[in-house]
Image: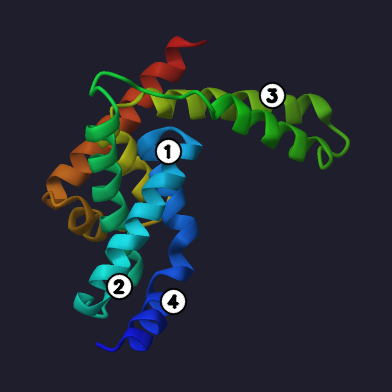
Amino acid sequence: MARGDSKTRFADVVMPHLDDAYSLARWVTGNRADAEDVVQEACLRAYRGIGGFAGRNGRAWLLAIVRNAAYDWLRKNRSPAVVNVDDLEAVERMRLADDAAGTGDNPEAALIARADEAKLQAAIARLPAVFRETLALRDMQGLDYKEIAAITGVPIGTVMSRLARARRRLIEMLGADR
């Protein structure tokens, strides 16, 4: 494939899905800066491999690359026991500031909703990485079980099991907070 063709194909296949790539990397790494590093590495890998892209589902193809890059990054840079949620609070503060302008007539309801969202975000961040990524791919990225199975390299039954277990743990964690 000619260099110009690679650039055009990369722009067509990868660029429309960068927000989804960052979102997945953010949920897997738990950190904004780390997610940016992972997406950068994933884009390099995607550019190098764009000639092998079969042309079916660019989003799933890119998310599989992001997932692999994220786990490679985690293996290289963190102990498996470490769960990093250091900048979730900063994200939540920004979201609170953004939402404050549009709270309308009921600031109490808006405050309660933001507090609930913060608890949910913190609970998701405490999930093991395999549950967090499955939950992010299904509930945040809207992928179906077959796509998630292809991205993660596990059978559909495992995807369904991980999703059910992730949701059950979230319910347990959120119930324990009350």
Image position of 123 with respect to 157: above or below:
above
User: Horizontally, is 82 left or right of 112 in the view?
Assistant: left
- 15 vs 113, left or right, is left
For the residues marked 2 and 3, what is the alpha-carbon distance in whole angstroms?
A: 39 Å
Name the residue tied to disc 2: 57
Locate residue 37: give its quadrant.
top left
Q: Amino acid at mark 3?
A: Ile
Q: Helix or strand or loop: what does disc 1 sit on? A: helix
* Disc on res. 11: 4
Q: Answer yes or no: do the residues labelled 2 and 3 have beta carbons within 8 Å?
A: no
Question: Mark 1 — residue?
Answer: 34
- Please, what is the three-letter code of the amino acid marked with disc 2? Asn
Q: Of marks 2 and 4, which one's residue comes earlier in the chain? A: 4
Q: Nearer the viewer, residue 37 or 90?
A: 37
- The answer to whether the residues at label 1 and label 3 have Cβ atoms under 8 Å apart is no
Q: CA distance from mark 1 to mark 3?
A: 30 Å
How far apart in space, not on screen, are marks 3 and 4 (Cα)? Answer: 42 Å
Q: CA distance from mark 2 to mark 1?
A: 26 Å
The nearer-to-camera label among 2 and 4 is 4
**Disc 3 secondary structure class:** helix
Image-quadrant location for residue 59: bottom left
In the picture of the structure, the residue carrying the numbered disc 3 is 112
Q: Nearer the viewer, mark 2 or mark 1?
A: 1
Q: Earlier in the sequence, mark 4 or mark 1?
A: 4
View extreme (right): residue:
105
Estimate the spatial distance between the alpha carbons at disc 4 and disc 1, rounded to whole Å.
23 Å
> Badge 3 local density, few (<14 within 10 Å), some, or many (20+)?
few
Q: Nearer the viewer, mark 1 or mark 3?
A: 1
Q: Nearer the viewer, residue 72 or 116?
A: 72
Name the residue: 32% across, 41% down. Answer: 133
